[in-house]
Image: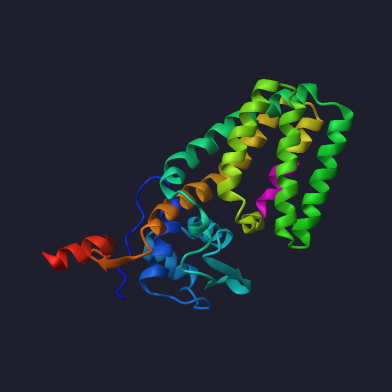
Amino acid sequence: MAYEATPVKVESLITKAADEIRRFIDLREMVPGATLPPETQLATMLGISRNSLREALRILDSLGFIEKRAGKQAIVRSRLGLVRRVADPANVLEGLPVAYEARMLIEHKCAELAAGRVQDQELLNLSNLLDAFEKELDQRRYEAASQIHRQFHDSLVLAAKNPLLSQIYAGIAAAITEQTDVVPESLKDRRLRSVHRAIYEAIRDRSTSRAGIAVREHFRANRPRVEFRAHAQQQNALLPGSSAKVKPSGRAEVESSGRARAGRRS
């Protein structure tokens, strides 16, 4: 099937770039193990910088579409990735990015409060969780790291000692976890160590401003993955029982099999 690249020139550039690469894999019908073009070629094809391309590839790697290997090589793992496990794609598309933004605002405030209210035992608990998290990452045990990651954030919120914020956080975190923690491979992002360490150190040093900034940096780094996940889920929701047609522009036009059958009967 022919593929014609659509240069990425809109907002959320990294998210759109990741989706273009996913579309390239799909329309080329690349099987698991197939090698993607070199980074230089992909960047030129999409009209973006090498740095932006690498961020897009990192998203696809964490969600199971590709695997980054030594020597800057990327191979296809699955044309569907891991996002099709989500139950309700329409709700994910509409709600997940909003819920993610709300969680960031809550944790931002909780980190600031924790910096002024944290007790020694709570600091020790955060430190132990952070050490355990990094140890699991070193061993590439991402399922275990994912559980500790949740405990770290839960403990951060509790250290703020604000029951209302804790209650709101619990509801939002549960909704997000249901959709995102099925892909613990997202923890392969190397920045996670430094951003979590920065959060802990800011709280330890009782620095309200640094704690808030560190939390925002954590969520900022992960936001493109959340946006892409929601968008990809919407696209994949149309795949079962569907047929894809490609317009001359190269964009996929998905037509339900039911509509196609109705057209044949008329």
| x and y, in percent, of residue 160 in the image | 73, 25
Residue 48 seen: no
| Residue 51 position within the rendered picture, expressed as x and y whole percent measured from the top left | 52, 57
Could you tell whether 174 is left or right of 93 in the image?
right
Judge by depth and name the residue closer to the eye, 249 or 42: 249
Taking the image as shown, residue 75 lies to the left or right of residue 169, namely left
Q: Position of residue 207 (x, y in %)?
A: 75, 27
Q: Is residue 265 visible?
A: yes
Position of residue 227 measured from the top left corner of the image (x, y, whole percent)? 47, 47
- Residue lying farthest to the front in this orientation: 265
Point 75% across, 41% down: residue: 152
In terms of depth relative to the viewer, which is nearer, 264 or 78? 264
Residue occupying image coordinates x 72% and y 23%:
113
Is the residue 215 above or below the residue 145 in the image? above
Measuring 53% from the left and 78% from the top, which residue is drawn there?
33
Is 84 magenta? The answer is no
| Residue range corresponding to the magenta coloring | 190-198
